[in-house]
Amino acid sequence: MKTGSLLGAVALISACSFSVIPEGAARGASDQVSDQHSGQQLGEWTQGISDLDQPQSTINVNPAKAIKPVASDQLVKIGGNETRAVGVGIALGPDIGALGIDAARASGALKSFRTSCSSLARREDNSGLTQGQDWQQSCDAAKAWPENDANRFFESYFEAVQIGDGKAFATGYFEPEIKGSRVRNGRYQVPVYRRPTNLLDVDLGLFSEELKDKKIRGKIDGTKLVPFEDRGQIDDGALAGQGLEIAWVEDYIDFFVLQIQGSGRLALPDGSVMRIGYASQNGRDYTGIGKLMRERGLLADGKTNMQGIVEWLRANPQEGMKIMRENKSYVFFNELTGPGPLGAMGHPVVGRVSVAADRQFVPLGAPVFLNMEHDIADGLWVAQDTGGAIKGSNRFDTFWGAGEEAARIAGGMSSRGQALIFLPKGTFARLTGR
């Protein structure tokens, strides 16, 4: 590829119809239904946990204490850029010790925070809230801090900060397991592709300050940068014969759900498991089919969660295939041989501990405290992932792990509440001069 061809293609990018690519795994690409009251986005699967039968193990016996939000006139705004945390305003929240954090949740958060530390000091914080050195003291302390005393760790090294109005909206994701094979045979006909070598990532910020943090994906066609093939074209064989298949799966709908989650497990015929993780995405806009199906009146009352959508797709295979193709986004995978699934930081995400957030508003690696309508999501999490539709302040996607229970909780998670971000002590004073 000639560099001059790419530069020429990007020179006219503002006049083109390319979409900005989603960050992180596609599982964050939940339904983008505008909520007029909070400005948040509704999840792909919208039925709440309270509408589902809950086994006792899913009930949070230690729900979070209520958070009294700081009034908007008390927020301190730094600069005029409202596309990141400092621009929408920040305020000190309550003392961490007063939040009543469950000891087990704090212990799990300490473990995941410790894992994140290797990246915290060297990653650029897009939110504008922290600098790499801000995390050094807490990360040094975390190395040997006893996990059975995790609450004291967070109380000693962090302060709670409200971003904007603090009004949170949370959905859920999980690691699905579906039937697959390393080789194609009669039952396994749906390909799982690795990232194509001609798929290009373009950082538009290299060409214009106005496009900072904006990226697109595409491919070179002659001297032009053009969109990559969409879902329908790929399903019809656009990538066949290129040796990109890393596995084959039995069921297209199961694989479609796995692509939304961004990682998963393939149960192989010999009883072993192959784990696959997000490698890239074709750069096309994500369209949540749940929104389409609701708008068209296809889903009955009580069937607007993940399980209800899948049920309808199976009952209406031809129309269901057409609807799935309306989501032009397509995810590519690689095989995971170590711990995982991996989040946007490159570290393993942990069920009931890791949460996806918008890096423009939350430093990746930061602890996050949620107090939600559905108590099961209450408590301390660690922001270790991002997602295509996890956008805006206080928008989160909670990770629930693998298995049937995780799928059920994630599929029904759609909850509102309040959020606080834990930042190293002294951060608020450094930012505001207070």
Image: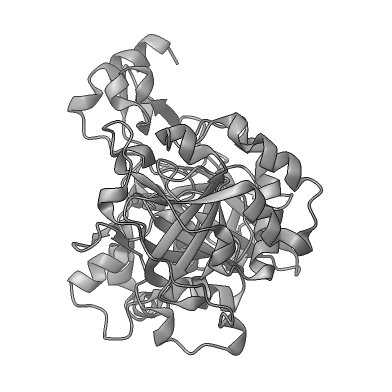
The quarter of the image holding the C terminus is top left
Residue 348 shows in this picture: no
Q: Does residue 108 lie above or below 433 as drawn? A: below
The quarter of the image holding the N terminus is top left
Q: Is residue 108 left or right of residue 304?
A: right
Question: Residue pushed farthest top?
Answer: 4
Picture quadrant where residue 305 is located? bottom left
Q: Total number of numbered labels? A: 0
Residue placed most toward the observer, 262 or 320: 262
Where in the figure is residue 234, as x and y percent of width and height?
A: 40, 48
Q: Residue at x 52, y 54 (%)?
A: 191
Where in the figure is residue 120, as x and y percent of width and height?
A: 61, 37
Where in the figure is residue 345, as x and y percent of width and height?
A: 58, 42
Q: Does residue 125 lie above or below 3 as drawn? A: below
Picture quadrant where residue 149 is located? bottom right
Question: Residue pushed farthest front?
Answer: 434
Q: Does residue 178 lie above or below 125 as drawn? A: below
Q: Is residue 325 left or right of residue 137?
A: left
Q: Is residue 18 left or right of residue 407?
A: left
Residue placed most toward the observer, 427 or 404: 427
Where in the figure is residue 44, as x and y percent of width and height?
A: 35, 65
Q: Residue at x 30, y 49 (%)?
A: 74
Q: Residue at x 31, y 34 (%)?
A: 227
Residue 97 shows in this picture: yes
